[in-house]
Amino acid sequence: MSLFIYNSLGRTKEIFEPLHPGIVTIYVCGPTVYGHAHLGHAKSYVSFDVVVRWLRHSGYRVKHVQNITDVGHLTDDADEGEDKISKQALLEKTDPMEISQFYTRSFYEDMDRLDVQRANIAPNAAGHIPEQIDLIEQLIKTGHAYAVNGNVYFSVESFPEYGKLSGRTDQDALQSGARVEVRSEKRHLSDFALWKKAEAGHLMKWSSPWSIGYPGWHLECSAMSMKYLGETIDIHGGGMENKFPHHDCEIAQSESVTGKPYVRFWMHNNMVTVNGVKMGKSLKNFINLKDLFSIFEPMVIRFFILQSHYRSQLDFSDVAIRASQTGLEKLQETYKRLATVSTYSGSLPIDESSKVTLQTREFDKKIKEALNDDFNTPVAISVIFEFVKAINSALDRPEGLSIKATEEAIAFFETYAGAVLGILKSRKELVNKEGQYEGKILDEVMNVLLNLRAEARKNKDFALSDKIRDQLLDTGIEIKDTKEGASWSKKSAT
RNA sequence: GGCGAAGUGGCCGAGUGGUUAGGCAGAGGUCUGCAAAACCUUGUACAGCGGUUCGAGUCCGCUCUUCGCCUCCA
Protein backbone atom coordinates (compact mmCIF):
# COMPACT_ATOMS: atom_id res chain seq x y z
CA MET A 1 0.00 0.00 0.00
CA SER A 2 1.52 3.30 -1.07
CA LEU A 3 1.64 6.45 0.98
CA PHE A 4 0.10 9.49 -0.69
CA ILE A 5 1.07 12.95 0.46
CA TYR A 6 -0.52 16.20 -0.65
CA ASN A 7 2.30 18.28 -2.08
CA SER A 8 1.66 22.01 -1.84
CA LEU A 9 4.07 22.40 -4.74
CA GLY A 10 1.71 21.23 -7.47
CA ARG A 11 -1.34 21.03 -5.21
CA THR A 12 -2.03 17.35 -5.68
CA LYS A 13 -1.61 14.14 -3.77
CA GLU A 14 1.47 12.28 -4.95
CA ILE A 15 2.89 8.88 -4.14
CA PHE A 16 5.61 9.33 -1.60
CA GLU A 17 8.94 7.65 -2.13
CA PRO A 18 11.99 9.00 -0.32
CA LEU A 19 15.00 10.17 -2.29
CA HIS A 20 17.22 7.60 -0.59
CA PRO A 21 15.49 4.25 -0.05
CA GLY A 22 14.59 3.59 3.54
CA ILE A 23 15.51 7.03 4.84
CA VAL A 24 13.20 10.03 5.06
CA THR A 25 14.56 13.51 5.65
CA ILE A 26 12.07 15.98 7.10
CA TYR A 27 12.44 19.55 8.25
CA VAL A 28 9.63 21.25 10.15
CA CYS A 29 9.60 25.01 10.76
CA GLY A 30 9.93 25.51 14.49
CA PRO A 31 8.72 28.26 16.79
CA THR A 32 10.13 31.71 17.41
CA VAL A 33 10.78 31.63 21.11
CA TYR A 34 9.56 34.87 22.58
CA GLY A 35 6.34 33.69 24.19
CA HIS A 36 4.59 30.59 25.44
CA ALA A 37 3.29 28.12 22.87
CA HIS A 38 -0.36 28.32 21.88
CA LEU A 39 -2.96 26.00 20.36
CA GLY A 40 -1.74 26.81 16.86
CA HIS A 41 1.70 25.45 17.69
CA ALA A 42 0.02 22.38 19.12
CA LYS A 43 -1.93 21.74 15.91
CA SER A 44 1.15 22.09 13.78
CA TYR A 45 3.50 19.99 15.87
CA VAL A 46 0.98 17.31 16.79
CA SER A 47 0.16 16.95 13.07
CA PHE A 48 3.79 16.60 12.05
CA ASP A 49 4.40 14.31 15.00
CA VAL A 50 1.89 11.88 13.54
CA VAL A 51 3.55 12.26 10.13
CA VAL A 52 6.89 11.27 11.64
CA ARG A 53 5.36 8.47 13.73
CA TRP A 54 3.53 7.03 10.74
CA LEU A 55 6.64 7.13 8.57
CA ARG A 56 8.58 5.37 11.31
CA HIS A 57 5.80 2.84 11.76
CA SER A 58 5.91 2.24 8.00
CA GLY A 59 9.50 1.16 8.37
CA TYR A 60 11.43 4.27 7.39
CA ARG A 61 14.35 5.65 9.28
CA VAL A 62 13.27 9.26 9.74
CA LYS A 63 15.72 12.09 10.19
CA HIS A 64 13.64 14.89 11.66
CA VAL A 65 15.04 18.39 12.10
CA GLN A 66 13.17 21.23 13.72
CA ASN A 67 14.70 24.65 14.21
CA ILE A 68 14.31 27.01 17.12
CA THR A 69 14.24 30.60 15.95
CA ASP A 70 16.08 32.61 18.54
CA VAL A 71 17.38 35.40 16.36
CA GLY A 72 15.13 38.37 16.86
CA HIS A 73 13.22 38.92 13.68
CA LEU A 74 11.16 41.99 13.22
CA THR A 75 7.82 42.76 14.76
CA ASP A 76 5.98 44.32 11.88
CA ASP A 77 7.66 44.77 8.54
CA ALA A 78 10.44 43.07 6.66
CA ASP A 79 12.48 46.24 6.63
CA GLU A 80 11.41 48.28 9.62
CA GLY A 81 10.24 47.63 13.13
CA GLU A 82 11.68 46.13 16.26
CA ASP A 83 13.34 42.83 16.89
CA LYS A 84 10.69 40.88 18.75
CA ILE A 85 12.94 38.94 21.05
CA SER A 86 14.75 42.14 22.03
CA LYS A 87 11.40 43.78 22.54
CA GLN A 88 10.35 41.04 24.92
CA ALA A 89 13.74 41.27 26.64
CA LEU A 90 13.26 44.98 27.25
CA LEU A 91 9.74 44.31 28.45
CA GLU A 92 10.91 41.65 30.89
CA LYS A 93 14.06 43.67 31.70
CA THR A 94 16.46 40.92 30.82
CA ASP A 95 18.82 39.64 28.15
CA PRO A 96 17.51 38.35 24.77
CA MET A 97 19.32 35.07 25.34
CA GLU A 98 17.49 34.55 28.61
CA ILE A 99 14.20 35.17 26.81
CA SER A 100 14.91 32.67 24.08
CA GLN A 101 16.17 30.01 26.48
CA PHE A 102 13.26 30.49 28.86
CA TYR A 103 10.68 30.12 26.10
CA THR A 104 12.56 27.28 24.46
CA ARG A 105 12.25 25.31 27.69
CA SER A 106 8.62 26.32 27.96
CA PHE A 107 8.02 25.11 24.42
CA TYR A 108 9.49 21.68 25.10
CA GLU A 109 7.57 21.39 28.34
CA ASP A 110 4.30 21.87 26.46
CA MET A 111 5.26 19.62 23.56
CA ASP A 112 6.36 16.87 25.96
CA ARG A 113 2.99 17.04 27.67
CA LEU A 114 1.31 16.65 24.27
CA ASP A 115 3.52 13.61 23.73
CA VAL A 116 5.17 15.17 20.66
CA GLN A 117 8.35 13.25 19.99
CA ARG A 118 11.38 15.50 19.89
CA ALA A 119 13.23 16.06 16.64
CA ASN A 120 16.51 14.24 16.11
CA ILE A 121 18.23 17.58 15.72
CA ALA A 122 16.87 20.90 16.99
CA PRO A 123 19.29 23.57 15.78
CA ASN A 124 18.91 27.18 16.81
CA ALA A 125 19.42 30.07 14.45
CA ALA A 126 21.78 32.05 16.67
CA GLY A 127 24.08 29.05 16.79
CA HIS A 128 24.34 28.95 13.01
CA ILE A 129 25.38 32.47 12.05
CA PRO A 130 28.57 31.32 10.23
CA GLU A 131 26.53 28.91 8.10
CA GLN A 132 24.13 31.70 7.20
CA ILE A 133 26.95 34.11 6.35
CA ASP A 134 28.50 31.40 4.21
CA LEU A 135 25.24 30.97 2.29
CA ILE A 136 25.02 34.72 1.67
CA GLU A 137 28.59 34.76 0.36
CA GLN A 138 27.76 32.00 -2.08
CA LEU A 139 24.68 33.89 -3.24
CA ILE A 140 26.70 37.06 -3.82
CA LYS A 141 29.39 35.09 -5.65
CA THR A 142 26.84 33.53 -7.99
CA GLY A 143 25.18 36.85 -8.69
CA HIS A 144 21.94 36.15 -6.83
CA ALA A 145 22.53 38.70 -4.07
CA TYR A 146 23.99 42.15 -3.66
CA ALA A 147 25.19 44.29 -0.76
CA VAL A 148 24.06 47.88 -0.23
CA ASN A 149 24.93 50.04 2.78
CA GLY A 150 25.72 47.05 4.98
CA ASN A 151 22.52 45.25 3.98
CA VAL A 152 22.40 42.29 1.63
CA TYR A 153 19.39 41.50 -0.55
CA PHE A 154 18.41 38.55 -2.64
CA SER A 155 17.65 39.50 -6.22
CA VAL A 156 14.36 37.89 -7.21
CA GLU A 157 15.03 38.67 -10.87
CA SER A 158 17.98 36.27 -10.70
CA PHE A 159 15.62 33.40 -9.90
CA PRO A 160 12.83 33.24 -12.52
CA GLU A 161 10.89 30.61 -10.60
CA TYR A 162 10.51 32.85 -7.55
CA GLY A 163 7.00 32.47 -6.14
CA LYS A 164 6.36 29.04 -7.64
CA LEU A 165 5.14 27.61 -4.36
CA SER A 166 2.53 30.25 -3.59
CA GLY A 167 1.63 30.99 -7.19
CA ARG A 168 2.90 34.54 -6.95
CA THR A 169 5.10 34.44 -9.96
CA ASP A 170 4.49 37.80 -11.60
CA GLN A 171 6.47 40.08 -9.31
CA ASP A 172 5.66 43.30 -11.14
CA ALA A 173 1.94 42.66 -11.03
CA LEU A 174 2.10 42.00 -7.30
CA GLN A 175 3.29 45.43 -6.39
CA SER A 176 0.18 47.43 -7.20
CA GLY A 177 -1.85 46.49 -4.16
CA ALA A 178 0.95 45.42 -1.88
CA ARG A 179 1.45 47.06 1.45
CA VAL A 180 5.23 47.01 1.30
CA GLU A 181 6.92 50.39 1.45
CA VAL A 182 9.18 51.33 -1.42
CA ARG A 183 12.79 51.04 -0.42
CA SER A 184 15.06 52.69 -2.87
CA GLU A 185 18.23 50.76 -2.11
CA LYS A 186 16.61 47.55 -3.38
CA ARG A 187 16.91 46.76 -7.07
CA HIS A 188 13.45 45.27 -7.16
CA LEU A 189 10.58 45.78 -4.75
CA SER A 190 10.27 42.05 -4.14
CA ASP A 191 13.93 41.61 -3.21
CA PHE A 192 14.24 40.37 0.35
CA ALA A 193 16.87 40.86 3.01
CA LEU A 194 19.54 38.24 3.63
CA TRP A 195 21.52 40.38 6.06
CA LYS A 196 20.44 43.47 7.94
CA LYS A 197 22.73 46.06 9.41
CA ALA A 198 21.90 46.56 13.09
CA GLU A 199 20.36 49.90 13.99
CA ALA A 200 21.61 51.66 17.11
CA GLY A 201 20.35 49.86 20.21
CA HIS A 202 19.69 46.57 18.44
CA LEU A 203 20.67 43.86 20.90
CA MET A 204 21.18 40.70 18.87
CA LYS A 205 23.93 41.26 16.36
CA TRP A 206 26.98 39.61 14.89
CA SER A 207 29.86 40.75 12.71
CA SER A 208 29.83 39.90 9.04
CA PRO A 209 31.70 40.98 5.90
CA TRP A 210 28.99 43.61 5.29
CA SER A 211 28.14 45.09 8.66
CA ILE A 212 27.50 44.31 12.28
CA GLY A 213 23.99 43.03 12.01
CA TYR A 214 21.79 39.99 11.85
CA PRO A 215 20.55 37.49 9.27
CA GLY A 216 17.32 37.84 7.31
CA TRP A 217 14.46 35.79 8.61
CA HIS A 218 14.24 33.29 5.75
CA LEU A 219 17.87 32.31 5.83
CA GLU A 220 18.16 30.07 8.87
CA CYS A 221 15.89 27.33 7.56
CA SER A 222 17.82 27.05 4.29
CA ALA A 223 21.17 27.01 6.04
CA MET A 224 20.23 24.50 8.72
CA SER A 225 18.12 22.25 6.53
CA MET A 226 20.94 21.86 4.04
CA LYS A 227 23.56 21.47 6.75
CA TYR A 228 21.82 18.65 8.57
CA LEU A 229 19.70 16.99 5.88
CA GLY A 230 21.40 17.73 2.58
CA GLU A 231 20.74 19.93 -0.43
CA THR A 232 17.52 18.13 -1.34
CA ILE A 233 15.21 16.94 1.39
CA ASP A 234 12.11 14.78 1.21
CA ILE A 235 9.63 16.78 3.27
CA HIS A 236 9.48 20.33 4.52
CA GLY A 237 6.59 21.12 6.83
CA GLY A 238 5.21 24.33 8.19
CA GLY A 239 2.19 26.50 8.63
CA MET A 240 0.21 27.68 5.63
CA GLU A 241 0.86 31.30 6.48
CA ASN A 242 4.52 30.68 5.79
CA LYS A 243 4.06 29.61 2.19
CA PHE A 244 4.64 33.16 1.11
CA PRO A 245 7.00 34.72 1.50
CA HIS A 246 8.98 32.48 3.84
CA HIS A 247 9.00 29.20 1.95
CA ASP A 248 9.23 30.81 -1.47
CA CYS A 249 12.27 32.71 -0.25
CA GLU A 250 13.81 29.56 1.14
CA ILE A 251 13.40 27.89 -2.24
CA ALA A 252 14.95 30.84 -4.04
CA GLN A 253 17.98 31.05 -1.75
CA SER A 254 18.66 27.36 -1.66
CA GLU A 255 18.07 26.43 -5.27
CA SER A 256 20.06 29.44 -6.50
CA VAL A 257 23.08 28.09 -4.69
CA THR A 258 22.72 24.37 -5.32
CA GLY A 259 20.94 24.26 -8.65
CA LYS A 260 19.00 21.31 -7.20
CA PRO A 261 15.44 20.99 -5.92
CA TYR A 262 15.42 22.13 -2.29
CA VAL A 263 12.36 20.18 -1.14
CA ARG A 264 10.51 17.31 -2.79
CA PHE A 265 7.29 17.46 -0.77
CA TRP A 266 6.02 20.66 0.81
CA MET A 267 3.45 20.06 3.53
CA HIS A 268 1.42 22.91 4.97
CA ASN A 269 -0.89 22.61 7.91
CA ASN A 270 -3.89 24.84 8.33
CA MET A 271 -4.72 27.32 11.05
CA VAL A 272 -6.57 27.17 14.32
CA THR A 273 -9.35 29.70 14.40
CA VAL A 274 -11.29 31.17 17.29
CA ASN A 275 -14.82 32.12 16.36
CA GLY A 276 -13.78 31.71 12.76
CA VAL A 277 -10.84 34.08 12.95
CA LYS A 278 -7.24 32.96 12.83
CA MET A 279 -5.47 32.65 16.12
CA GLY A 280 -2.17 34.42 16.00
CA LYS A 281 0.52 35.80 18.21
CA SER A 282 0.07 39.27 16.85
CA LEU A 283 -3.69 39.10 17.24
CA LYS A 284 -4.59 39.01 20.88
CA ASN A 285 -6.84 35.97 20.58
CA PHE A 286 -4.46 33.10 21.10
CA ILE A 287 -5.12 30.24 23.48
CA ASN A 288 -2.08 29.62 25.61
CA LEU A 289 -1.37 25.90 26.02
CA LYS A 290 -0.41 26.15 29.67
CA ASP A 291 -3.78 27.77 30.38
CA LEU A 292 -5.60 25.17 28.33
CA PHE A 293 -3.82 22.31 30.12
CA SER A 294 -5.22 23.55 33.41
CA ILE A 295 -8.71 22.82 32.06
CA PHE A 296 -8.18 19.85 29.72
CA GLU A 297 -5.70 17.03 29.78
CA PRO A 298 -3.02 17.48 27.10
CA MET A 299 -4.10 14.20 25.53
CA VAL A 300 -7.62 15.60 25.06
CA ILE A 301 -6.12 18.53 23.16
CA ARG A 302 -4.05 16.16 21.06
CA PHE A 303 -7.13 14.07 20.29
CA PHE A 304 -9.18 17.18 19.49
CA ILE A 305 -6.52 18.27 17.00
CA LEU A 306 -6.30 14.86 15.34
CA GLN A 307 -10.07 14.66 14.91
CA SER A 308 -9.73 17.14 12.08
CA HIS A 309 -7.40 16.89 9.10
CA TYR A 310 -4.12 18.79 9.21
CA ARG A 311 -5.01 20.68 6.02
CA SER A 312 -8.36 21.82 7.42
CA GLN A 313 -8.95 24.77 9.64
CA LEU A 314 -9.81 23.82 13.18
CA ASP A 315 -12.20 26.04 15.05
CA PHE A 316 -11.58 26.22 18.75
CA SER A 317 -14.50 26.13 21.12
CA ASP A 318 -15.13 24.86 24.58
CA VAL A 319 -18.04 22.62 23.55
CA ALA A 320 -16.04 21.06 20.72
CA ILE A 321 -13.18 20.12 23.05
CA ARG A 322 -15.61 18.81 25.62
CA ALA A 323 -17.19 16.58 23.00
CA SER A 324 -13.73 15.28 22.13
CA GLN A 325 -13.01 14.63 25.77
CA THR A 326 -16.09 12.46 26.17
CA GLY A 327 -15.27 10.56 23.00
CA LEU A 328 -11.67 9.97 24.04
CA GLU A 329 -12.80 8.64 27.42
CA LYS A 330 -15.07 6.15 25.70
CA LEU A 331 -12.22 4.98 23.51
CA GLN A 332 -9.90 4.56 26.47
CA GLU A 333 -12.53 2.83 28.56
CA THR A 334 -12.75 0.16 25.91
CA TYR A 335 -9.01 -0.38 25.98
CA LYS A 336 -9.18 -0.57 29.73
CA ARG A 337 -11.99 -3.09 29.47
CA LEU A 338 -9.90 -5.21 27.12
CA ALA A 339 -6.91 -5.06 29.41
CA THR A 340 -9.10 -6.02 32.35
CA VAL A 341 -10.78 -8.90 30.56
CA SER A 342 -7.43 -10.27 29.43
CA THR A 343 -6.48 -10.86 33.06
CA TYR A 344 -9.96 -11.88 34.21
CA SER A 345 -10.99 -15.47 34.45
CA GLY A 346 -14.74 -15.90 34.53
CA SER A 347 -16.50 -18.25 36.89
CA LEU A 348 -17.67 -20.56 34.12
CA PRO A 349 -15.02 -22.00 31.86
CA ILE A 350 -16.18 -21.48 28.29
CA ASP A 351 -14.77 -23.38 25.39
CA GLU A 352 -12.44 -21.05 23.47
CA SER A 353 -13.87 -22.09 20.13
CA SER A 354 -17.36 -20.88 21.08
CA LYS A 355 -16.15 -17.38 21.98
CA VAL A 356 -16.56 -14.30 19.84
CA THR A 357 -13.84 -13.24 17.41
CA LEU A 358 -13.22 -9.89 15.74
CA GLN A 359 -12.48 -8.81 12.19
CA THR A 360 -9.31 -7.11 13.38
CA ARG A 361 -7.60 -7.48 10.02
CA GLU A 362 -10.38 -5.55 8.31
CA PHE A 363 -10.04 -2.67 10.74
CA ASP A 364 -6.30 -2.83 10.37
CA LYS A 365 -6.62 -2.50 6.61
CA LYS A 366 -9.02 0.42 6.85
CA ILE A 367 -6.90 2.39 9.29
CA LYS A 368 -3.77 1.84 7.20
CA GLU A 369 -5.61 3.14 4.14
CA ALA A 370 -6.67 6.24 6.04
CA LEU A 371 -3.20 7.03 7.29
CA ASN A 372 -1.65 6.34 3.91
CA ASP A 373 -4.10 8.78 2.37
CA ASP A 374 -2.29 11.97 3.31
CA PHE A 375 -2.35 11.17 7.03
CA ASN A 376 -6.11 11.20 7.37
CA THR A 377 -6.26 11.06 11.15
CA PRO A 378 -10.00 11.83 11.47
CA VAL A 379 -10.85 8.80 9.37
CA ALA A 380 -8.29 6.74 11.30
CA ILE A 381 -10.01 7.75 14.52
CA SER A 382 -13.41 6.86 13.08
CA VAL A 383 -12.05 3.37 12.34
CA ILE A 384 -10.95 3.07 15.96
CA PHE A 385 -14.46 4.02 17.08
CA GLU A 386 -15.99 1.41 14.82
CA PHE A 387 -13.61 -1.11 16.31
CA VAL A 388 -14.56 0.07 19.80
CA LYS A 389 -18.19 -0.66 19.01
CA ALA A 390 -17.36 -4.14 17.74
CA ILE A 391 -15.29 -4.89 20.84
CA ASN A 392 -17.88 -3.68 23.34
CA SER A 393 -20.57 -5.50 21.48
CA ALA A 394 -18.59 -8.74 21.67
CA LEU A 395 -17.71 -8.24 25.32
CA ASP A 396 -21.38 -7.70 26.15
CA ARG A 397 -22.26 -11.13 24.84
CA PRO A 398 -22.38 -13.98 27.32
CA GLU A 399 -19.70 -16.06 25.57
CA GLY A 400 -17.20 -13.22 25.77
CA LEU A 401 -14.25 -12.49 23.52
CA SER A 402 -11.74 -15.17 22.62
CA ILE A 403 -8.24 -14.89 24.02
CA LYS A 404 -6.78 -14.51 20.55
CA ALA A 405 -9.25 -11.77 19.58
CA THR A 406 -8.58 -9.95 22.86
CA GLU A 407 -4.85 -10.02 22.25
CA GLU A 408 -5.26 -8.81 18.69
CA ALA A 409 -7.51 -6.00 19.81
CA ILE A 410 -5.06 -4.93 22.49
CA ALA A 411 -2.26 -4.94 19.93
CA PHE A 412 -4.40 -2.86 17.56
CA PHE A 413 -5.00 -0.26 20.24
CA GLU A 414 -1.40 -0.11 21.28
CA THR A 415 -0.21 0.25 17.69
CA TYR A 416 -2.64 2.79 16.27
CA ALA A 417 -4.12 4.67 19.21
CA GLY A 418 -0.84 4.34 21.10
CA ALA A 419 2.30 4.34 18.98
CA VAL A 420 0.96 6.12 15.89
CA LEU A 421 -1.65 8.60 17.11
CA GLY A 422 -0.48 8.95 20.70
CA ILE A 423 -3.98 9.12 22.17
CA LEU A 424 -3.85 6.09 24.44
CA LYS A 425 -2.96 6.18 28.08
CA SER A 426 -0.71 3.38 29.17
CA ARG A 427 -2.27 0.36 30.77
CA LYS A 428 -0.39 1.35 33.88
CA GLU A 429 -2.39 4.56 34.06
CA LEU A 430 -5.71 3.02 33.11
CA VAL A 431 -5.93 -0.33 34.79
CA ASN A 432 -6.51 -0.27 38.49
CA LYS A 433 -5.07 -3.60 39.35
CA GLU A 434 -2.76 -4.15 42.26
CA GLY A 435 0.88 -3.52 41.53
CA GLN A 436 0.29 -2.13 38.06
CA TYR A 437 0.53 1.51 38.95
CA GLU A 438 1.95 3.82 41.55
CA GLY A 439 -1.19 4.42 43.57
CA LYS A 440 -1.11 0.98 45.05
CA ILE A 441 -2.51 2.17 48.35
CA LEU A 442 -5.47 3.83 46.66
CA ASP A 443 -6.10 0.55 44.87
CA GLU A 444 -6.17 -1.32 48.14
CA VAL A 445 -8.50 1.19 49.73
CA MET A 446 -10.77 1.03 46.72
CA ASN A 447 -10.81 -2.73 46.87
CA VAL A 448 -11.97 -2.57 50.46
CA LEU A 449 -14.76 -0.20 49.49
CA LEU A 450 -15.81 -2.20 46.46
CA ASN A 451 -15.90 -5.39 48.48
CA LEU A 452 -18.00 -3.72 51.17
CA ARG A 453 -20.37 -2.48 48.50
CA ALA A 454 -20.56 -5.89 46.84
CA GLU A 455 -21.45 -7.39 50.19
CA ALA A 456 -24.15 -4.78 50.79
CA ARG A 457 -25.61 -5.44 47.35
CA LYS A 458 -25.59 -9.14 48.03
CA ASN A 459 -27.61 -8.45 51.20
CA LYS A 460 -29.88 -6.12 49.23
CA ASP A 461 -28.80 -3.21 51.40
CA PHE A 462 -29.05 -0.81 48.47
CA ALA A 463 -29.15 2.24 50.70
CA LEU A 464 -25.60 1.49 51.79
CA SER A 465 -24.33 0.44 48.37
CA ASP A 466 -25.73 3.58 46.75
CA LYS A 467 -24.30 5.72 49.51
CA ILE A 468 -20.83 4.32 48.79
CA ARG A 469 -21.30 4.93 45.08
CA ASP A 470 -22.69 8.45 45.45
CA GLN A 471 -20.14 9.62 47.95
CA LEU A 472 -17.29 8.31 45.84
CA LEU A 473 -18.73 10.14 42.85
CA ASP A 474 -18.65 13.34 44.90
CA THR A 475 -14.91 12.85 45.34
CA GLY A 476 -14.52 12.29 41.60
CA ILE A 477 -14.44 8.49 41.50
CA GLU A 478 -16.96 6.73 39.34
CA ILE A 479 -18.07 3.14 39.85
CA LYS A 480 -19.29 0.96 37.03
CA ASP A 481 -20.84 -2.46 37.50
CA THR A 482 -19.80 -4.69 34.65
CA LYS A 483 -19.97 -8.33 33.83
CA GLU A 484 -16.37 -8.61 35.00
CA GLY A 485 -17.26 -7.08 38.38
CA ALA A 486 -17.23 -3.53 39.66
CA SER A 487 -14.53 -1.19 38.39
CA TRP A 488 -13.68 2.36 39.25
CA SER A 489 -12.08 5.27 37.50
CA LYS A 490 -11.23 8.84 38.23
CA LYS A 491 -13.47 11.29 36.44
CA SER A 492 -11.81 14.25 34.73
CA ALA A 493 -11.67 17.43 36.71
CA THR A 494 -14.00 19.09 34.23
C1' G B 1 -6.19 44.72 -6.33
C1' G B 2 -3.39 39.75 -6.66
C1' C B 3 -2.75 34.49 -4.86
C1' G B 4 -5.31 30.59 -2.28
C1' A B 5 -8.91 27.79 0.82
C1' A B 6 -13.78 26.84 2.32
C1' G B 7 -19.40 26.76 3.08
C1' U B 8 -22.05 19.26 5.21
C1' G B 9 -27.75 17.37 9.94
C1' G B 10 -28.41 20.82 17.09
C1' C B 11 -22.60 21.09 17.56
C1' C B 12 -17.65 19.26 15.92
C1' G B 13 -15.94 16.93 11.63
C1' A B 14 -14.65 13.08 7.27
C1' G B 15 -16.09 12.21 2.40
C1' U B 16 -14.44 14.07 -4.90
C1' G B 17 -19.82 10.42 -9.24
C1' G B 18 -23.88 5.40 -7.36
C1' U B 19 -23.76 1.46 -0.68
C1' U B 20 -24.33 4.20 7.10
C1' A B 21 -18.12 8.25 7.84
C1' G B 22 -17.13 8.98 12.97
C1' G B 23 -17.66 11.69 17.62
C1' C B 24 -20.74 14.80 20.97
C1' A B 25 -25.70 16.13 22.17
C1' G B 26 -31.19 14.42 21.64
C1' A B 27 -35.25 10.47 21.37
C1' G B 28 -36.93 5.27 22.13
C1' G B 29 -35.38 0.44 23.82
C1' U B 30 -32.14 -3.84 26.06
C1' C B 31 -29.30 -4.82 30.40
C1' U B 32 -29.29 -3.30 35.84
C1' G B 33 -32.22 -3.61 42.52
C1' C B 34 -31.78 1.63 40.81
C1' A B 35 -28.06 4.16 38.25
C1' A B 36 -23.72 4.67 35.31
C1' A B 37 -21.31 2.32 31.38
C1' A B 38 -22.11 -0.65 27.19
C1' C B 39 -25.24 -2.37 23.28
C1' C B 40 -29.61 -1.92 19.73
C1' U B 41 -32.91 1.46 17.08
C1' U B 42 -33.58 6.47 15.60
C1' G B 43 -32.30 12.10 12.47
C1' U B 44 -36.10 14.78 4.86
C1' A B 45 -27.23 17.18 6.05
C1' C B 46 -24.67 18.72 2.07
C1' A B 47 -25.01 27.89 0.93
C1' G B 48 -28.22 29.39 -3.49
C1' C B 49 -29.36 29.13 -8.82
C1' G B 50 -28.37 26.87 -13.39
C1' G B 51 -25.72 22.96 -16.23
C1' U B 52 -23.12 18.03 -17.49
C1' U B 53 -24.63 12.81 -16.41
C1' C B 54 -28.73 7.09 -16.38
C1' G B 55 -27.16 9.13 -11.57
C1' A B 56 -23.81 14.90 -8.07
C1' G B 57 -22.61 16.82 -1.41
C1' U B 58 -18.84 14.97 -4.96
C1' C B 59 -17.72 17.61 -11.94
C1' C B 60 -18.70 22.73 -14.69
C1' G B 61 -20.61 27.93 -14.56
C1' C B 62 -22.66 31.99 -11.98
C1' U B 63 -24.25 34.28 -7.28
C1' C B 64 -23.92 34.93 -2.00
C1' U B 65 -21.04 34.28 2.46
C1' U B 66 -16.66 33.15 5.39
C1' C B 67 -11.50 32.54 6.07
C1' G B 68 -6.01 32.62 5.05
C1' C B 69 -1.70 34.94 2.55
C1' C B 70 0.28 39.41 0.03
C1' U B 71 3.75 42.80 7.12
C1' C B 72 6.15 38.97 12.19
C1' C B 73 3.18 34.44 12.73
C1' A B 74 2.39 27.11 13.52
Image (tube, rainbow, N blue to C red):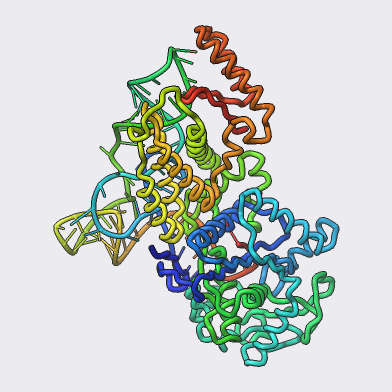
Instruction: Locate residue A272 relative to residue A348 in the image: left or right.
Output: right
In the rendered view of the protein, which quadrant contains the C terminus of chain A?
top right
Q: Which quadrant would residue B65 be assigned to in this image?
A: bottom left
**Residue B43: quarter of image:** top left
Q: Observer-nearest residue: A47 or A390?
A: A390
Q: Looking at the image, can residue A184 be seen? A: no
- Residue depicted at 56% across the width and 15% down the height: A453
* Residue found at x 57% / y 39%: A427
Residue name at image x 75 percent, y 86 percent:
A149
Of A185 and A2, nearer the camera is A2
- Residue A358: percent from the left, percent from the top? 36, 41
Question: Which quadrant is the N terminus of chain A positioned in?
Answer: bottom left
Q: Residue at x 49, y 57 (%)?
A: A310
Using the image, determine if residue A213 lies above or below residue A415: below
Residue A24 vs residue B47, the one in the foreground: A24
With respect to residue A270, does A83 lie above or below? below
Residue A486 location, x and y as percent? 52, 23
